[in-house]
Image (tube, helix red, strand yellow):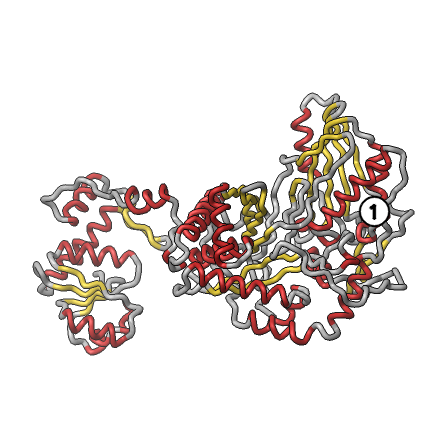
């Protein structure tokens, strides 16, 4: 579900299928084909599109490399026929009386918008190709004017092309691109041979589904399923507090990138064996590991993870292009008492329960749960886990070699993190999509290393407690425990710290020694103030082994106080002013200091200062 993909589906089904095909009454066709209601999912995307950057975030760009003798007329004819067959691709969204509605253009009035470029005479073919791809990726779609599907055919050589297809998520999903690919392959093959279109007629269109969905939500579906989601998400964490490289911006930017992720054959085989042992799907097992890592990184014992389901559980909609995919919010508890087996059992029960209640669109779940809304992050969850099991979307054009075009940029992230995985051969492969407003690539690579290590530990010892599973790769563990702790340095053994400080004063008296909230002291000034305090403390009776209480907040005075006490020959007793009053009283009485050093605004918190039971010096006011 990224904006920049090769020609393979992105949307997924959590359990590996779109759900059992429904045997209930058929979806009826809507008689009036003008100003039709949006589906709930479309309505949410429409609202997001009104936010700056929101629409562009949901434009999916697919790229193909074509080699061979291309029949461009047959390609155009095939693309036009797909638009004619699927109303969703001829749909725009009008605002009528403050409400968005679908408007479907007629077949004769709509064609696929394909722009052709010929770079054969271009001196810098690669540079111009990159420019055209960047232009295609950055050009926004207008939901009100359309079109919401378009393409570019870029000719690099006599028999070498790049085909770019951009389609808005509001009229498609990853399953849809599988349908698109299958139909384009069949139609191009027929038209190249001079044959007629032999694709079966579609029973209904997406607008029929949207109207049926809204009527269905007014009926029996809401009851039991609504209660499940209200209970499942009541009191769930609002935000997953993962460590990030930057503070969260006030408004989500949708800027993103992706890092490739591969689990080798040995680890993949181990995860499959672990799944068989605990009677879970591979999806559930890897999801359990992902939840364990997120809990570990965030320090939260509950995480909410979004996971998409294909939602193609009716015969009529299997062959339609449209936005059907639904999202389930899985609330997973990662208790410290769980071992790996118990974690997998918990994940399985939560995933199965969510699948059984997937009839309600996620958009309606959000309305029922009513989480706090913020432009800074997505509601309910901010991290996705997607397992790709949608039908393969590779296009097969007769007489041409077709391969994914991997130079398509990946510049969008709809969530903080989205882990997209699938089986490929004997490996698990995919990528971690991330918000560049929050994370550096190095951090993401490190998190993926943690994930790989944790999954390996799950396979090795499934009786291990989840919070004891190692996550650090050996290299990082060595760095953290040993290299960064190798802090031994040679220093003069015959001198005290204040003497070493005074030597630095003699070397660089004018250099800045302290900076705090816009105020600063150089070494000479800091030394003078510390000496002044030391003389005062000696006059008050401070001598070697005398205790001086120091109750100050972080400030210039804190450092002056420490140095002054040490120069006077005493020892300081650090007292945190944030402690409760009784705790402060006990610490001061127990240490019996000769003098209490503090700040003016803290006097009210110090009973001994109020009762004048000992000398008190306000470092910020009694300097003279």
Asked if residue 18 lies left or right of residue 339, the reply is right
The residue shown at (77%, 43%) is 150
Q: State the count of labels.
A: 1
Q: Is residue 77 above or below residue 240?
A: above
Q: Where is residue 523 in the image (x, y as percent from the top left)?
A: 24, 46
Quadrant the C terminus occupies: bottom left
Q: Which residue lies furthest to the right in this view?
A: 108
Q: In which quarter of the image is residue 612?
A: bottom left
Q: Which of 404 and 598 is in front in this view?
A: 404
Pointer 1 local density, CA inside 10 Å: few below 14, some 14–19, many at least 20: many
Q: Is residue 157 above or below residue 5?
A: above
Q: Is mark 1 on a helix, strand or loop?
A: helix
Q: Position of residue 211 (x, y in %)?
A: 80, 65
The residue shown at (29%, 42%) is 483
Q: Nearer the viewer, residue 507 or 109?
A: 109
Asked if residue 569 lies left or right of residue 373, the reply is left
Q: Where is residue 579 in the image (x, y as percent from the top left)?
A: 29, 70
Asked if residue 205 lies left or right of residue 67, the reply is right
Q: Which residue lies furthest to the front in this view?
A: 277
- Location of mark 1 (residue): 83
Q: Where is residue 539 in the image (x, y as percent from the top left)?
A: 10, 62
The residue shown at (12%, 59%) is 570
């Amino acid at each position: 579900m990224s904006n920049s993909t090769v020609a393979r589906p992105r949307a997924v089904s959590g359990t590996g299928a779109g759900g059992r095909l429904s045997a209930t009454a058929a979806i009826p066709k809507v008689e009036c084909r003008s100003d039709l209601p949006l589906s709930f999912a479309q309505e949410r995307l429409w609202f997001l599109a009104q936010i700056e950057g929101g629409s562009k975030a949901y434009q999916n760009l697919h790229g193909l490399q074509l080699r061979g003798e291309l029949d461009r007329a047959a390609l155009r004819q095939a693309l036009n026929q797909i638009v004619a067959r699927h109303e969703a691709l001829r749909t725009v969204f009008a605002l009528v009386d403050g409400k968005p509605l679908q408007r479907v253009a007629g077949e004769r009035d709509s064609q696929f918008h394909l722009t052709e470029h010929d770079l054969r005479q271009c001196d810098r073919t690669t540079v111009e190709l990159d420019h055209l791809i960047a232009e295609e990726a950055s050009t926004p779609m207008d939901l009100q004017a359309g079109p919401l599907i378009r393409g570019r055919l870029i000719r690099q050589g006599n028999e070498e092309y790049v085909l770019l297809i951009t389609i808005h998520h509001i009229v498609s999903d990853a399953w849809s691109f599988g349908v698109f690919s299958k139909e384009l392959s069949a139609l191009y093959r027929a038209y190249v041979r001079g044959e007629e279109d032999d694709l079966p007629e579609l029973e209904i269109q997406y607008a029929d589904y949207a109207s049926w969905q809204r009527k269905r939500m007014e009926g029996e579906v809401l009851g039991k399923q609504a209660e499940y989601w209200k209970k499942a998400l009541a009191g769930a964490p609002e935000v997953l507090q993962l460590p990030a490289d930057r503070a969260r911006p006030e408004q989500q930017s949708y800027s993103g990138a992706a890092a490739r992720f591969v689990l080798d054959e040995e680890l993949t085989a181990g995860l499959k064996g672990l799944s068989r042992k605990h009677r879970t799907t591979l999806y559930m097992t890897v999801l359990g590991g992902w939840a364990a890592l997120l809990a570990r990184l965030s320090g939260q014992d509950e995480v909410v993870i979004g996971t998409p389901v294909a939602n193609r559980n009716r015969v009529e909609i299997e062959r339609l292009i449209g936005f059907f995919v639904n999202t389930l919010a899985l609330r997973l508890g990662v208790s410290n008492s769980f071992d790996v087996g118990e974690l997998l059992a918990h994940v399985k029960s939560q995933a199965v329960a969510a699948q059984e209640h997937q009839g309600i669109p996620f958009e309606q779940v959000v309305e029922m749960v009513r989480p706090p809304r913020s432009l800074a992050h997505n509601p309910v969850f901010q991290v996705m886990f997607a397992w790709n099991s949608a039908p393969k979307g590779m296009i097969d054009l007769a007489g041409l070699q077709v391969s994914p075009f991997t130079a398509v940029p990946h510049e969008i992230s709809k969530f903080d993190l989205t882990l997209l995985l699938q089986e490929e051969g004997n490996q698990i492969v995919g990528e971690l999509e991330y918000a560049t407003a929050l994370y550096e690539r190095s951090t993401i690579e490190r998190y993926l290393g943690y994930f790989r290590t944790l999954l390996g530990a799950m396979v090795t010892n499934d009786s291990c407690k989840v919070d004891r599973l190692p996550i650090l790769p050996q290299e990082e563990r060595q760095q953290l425990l040993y290299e960064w702790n190798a802090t031994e340095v040679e220093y003069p053994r015959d001198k005290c710290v204040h003497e070493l400080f005074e030597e630095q004063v003699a070397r660089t008296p004018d250099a800045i020694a302290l900076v705090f909230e816009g105020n600063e002291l150089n070494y000479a000034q800091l030394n003078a103030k510390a000496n002044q305090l030391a003389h005062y403390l000696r006059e008050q009776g401070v001598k070697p082994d005398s205790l001086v209480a120091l109750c100050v907040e972080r400030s210039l005075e804190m450092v002056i106080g420490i140095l002054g006490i040490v120069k006077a020959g005493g020892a300081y007793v650090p007292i945190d002013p944030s402690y409760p009053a009784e705790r402060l009283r006990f610490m001061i009485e127990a240490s019996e200091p000769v003098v209490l050093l503090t700040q003016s605004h803290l006097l009210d918190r110090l009973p001994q200062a109020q009762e004048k039971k000992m000398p008190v010096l306000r470092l910020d006011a009694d300097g003279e």
